Amino acid sequence: MSRIISRHSRPPRPTNIEFVTYLMTQSRHGALVQPFVIEAIRYYCEAILQNPEPTEHGNMMVSAIAWHRIAKETLDKMNANYETASDTEFATSTPQTILSTE
């Protein structure tokens, strides 16, 4: 049976990982987009962490507590990956240890 495609059909959306990869690799500005995306993530994490960790889950689709902890975890991983060896306790970390699951 053939699949009926209407004129309103569109290809499936990429996964979030595929989309971020696309953002990081397909820019008219070349590789300059990569630090832009990384800094946008860092900026958002820092903005969330300006406030203390919530004590209630809130009424968001995702728990406010979890969102705050995700921002902290992400920022910690970014700092471990991008800070210079003299500025961080992660001086002996390798990309494999930074990217490994805990």
Image (tube, rainbow, N blue to C red):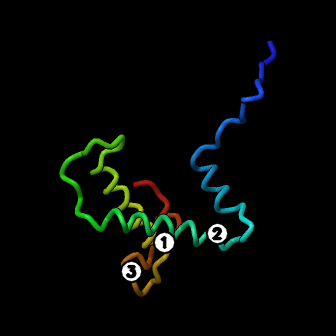
Front residue of 98/61: it is 61
Question: Given the image, on which type of amino acid does mark 3 rest?
Answer: Thr
Callout 1 secondary element: helix
The mark nearer the N terminus, 3 or 1, is 1
Gap between marks 2 and 1 measured at Cα: 18 Å
* Quarter of the image where the C terminus is located: bottom left
Front residue of 14/87: it is 14
**Residue tagged 2:** 33
Callout 2 secondary element: helix
Question: Given the image, on which type of amino acid does mark 1 rest?
Answer: Asn
Q: Residues at badges 2 and 3 in contact (C-beta under 8 Å)?
A: no
**Residue tagged 3:** 88
Residue 17 is situated, as x and y percent measured from the top left of the image, at: 59, 50
| Other residues around mark 2 within 10 Å, as few (<14) / some (14–19) / many (≥20) | some
| Other residues around mark 3 within 10 Å, as few (<14) / some (14–19) / many (≥20) | some
Residue 89 is situated, as x and y percent measured from the top left of the image, at: 36, 78
Front residue of 34/7: it is 7
**Residue tagged 1:** 81
Gap between marks 3 and 1 measured at Cα: 10 Å
